[in-house]
Image (cartoon, rainbow, N blue to C red):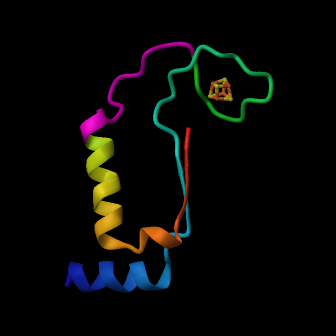
Amino acid sequence: MMKKVKEREMKEHRLVDLFWECTLSCNAHCKHCGSSAECKKYTGELTTQEIKDAFKQIAHDMDASKILINVT
Ligand code: SF4
């Protein structure tokens, strides 16, 4: 049941633009910043391996050649 729902949702709401903000930890203090990033270490952020796994899952589930990916 959940698999069918997931498949339908993925068909109806195709991922076309993926904006991946790797961390909220940043010490640059850019004036133009639109992020809620702060100069501190956040706990609970994804590990490098978890991020790699997420991208692998996206590549497996979707046509990655049709997704605009921004990593920041
Ligand atoms: S724009 Fe990017 S680099 Fe600059 S403060 Fe914001 S998160 Fe940091």
Indicate whether 32 appears above or below 63: above
Q: Would you identify the image quadrant in which residue 45 lies?
A: top left
Q: Residue 59: give x, y in percent of width and height.
A: 34, 64
Magenta stretch mostly in which secondary structure? loop
Instruction: Locate the C terminus by quadrant.
Output: top right
Q: Residue 55: give x, y in percent of width and height.
A: 35, 54
**Residue, far right:** 31
Indicate whether 35 appears above or below 14: above
In depth, the one of 66 and 33 nearer the eye is 66
Q: Is residue 14 magenta?
A: no
Indicate whether 63 appears above or below 53: below
**Residue, far front:** 65
Q: Residue 58: give x, y in percent of width and height.
A: 35, 63
| Ligand 1 found in image quarter | top right
Instruction: Give the residue displayed 22% in from the left and 80% down from the top.
Output: 3
Instruction: Give the residue displayed 26% in from the left and 86% down from the top.
Output: 4
Q: Say left or right for 13 vs 46.
A: right
Q: How many marks?
A: 0
Instruction: Locate the N terminus by quadrant.
Output: bottom left
Q: Would you identify the image quadrant in which residue 63 lies?
A: bottom left
Q: Say left or right for 7 vs 40.
A: left
Instruction: Give the residue displayed 27% in from the left and 42% down from the top.
Output: 50
In depth, the one of 51 and 42 nearer the eye is 51
Q: Which residues are magenta?
A: 39-49
Q: Residue 15: give x, y in percent of width and height.
A: 50, 70
Instruction: Give the residue displayed 29% in from the left and 57% down from the top.
Output: 56
Indicate whether 51 appears above or below 8: above
